Image (spheres, helix red, strand yellow):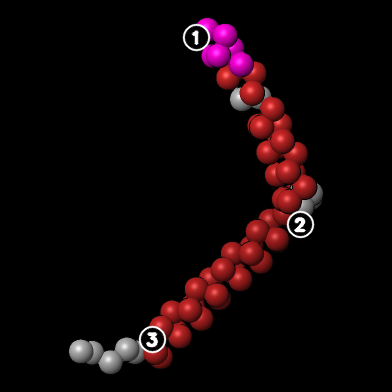
Amino acid sequence: MAKPNYSFEKRQRELAKKKKKEEKLKEKADRKQHGDAPGGDDEGVDASADGGEPAAPSAEGQSAN
């Protein structure tokens, strides 16, 4: 059986971390450049609005049955 190459696995993890960090920095710079509010606040509002809209069609669907 082949011996695991821990150095390779470690390097892959490091590259993934670096890529994720760069993406976060890029998103942060984009938000700062466009003057947008933090994404967490906007997403919470959108999620609650989306949650309310599907309720009405499902109620209509139940009365149709």
What residue sits 66% from the left and 32% below the top? Answer: 51
Left or right of 47 in this view: 41: right
Q: For the residue marked with disc 2, what is the amino acid?
A: Lys
Residue placed under numbered mark 2 in the picture? 32
In the image shown, does 41 or 52 lie closer to the viewer? 52
In the image shown, does 29 or 38 lie closer to the viewer? 38
Q: Is there a contact, CB below 8 Å, between mark 2 and mark 1?
A: no
Quick one: SS at disc 1?
loop
Residue placed under numbered mark 3 in the picture? 8
What residue sits 72% from the left and 50% below the top? Answer: 39
Closer to the eye: label 2 or 1:
1
What residue sits 72% from the left and 36% below the top? Answer: 48
Is 37 situated above or below 64? below
Of the numbered discs 3 and 1, the one sitting upstream in the chain is 3
Residue placed under numbered mark 1 in the picture? 65
Residue 18 is situated, as x and y percent measured from the top left of the image, at: 55, 76
Range covered by the magenta-colored residues? 59-65
| Distance CA(mark 2)–CA(mark 1) | 50 Å
Is 37 situated above or below 22? above
Q: For the residue marked with disc 3, what is the amino acid?
A: Phe
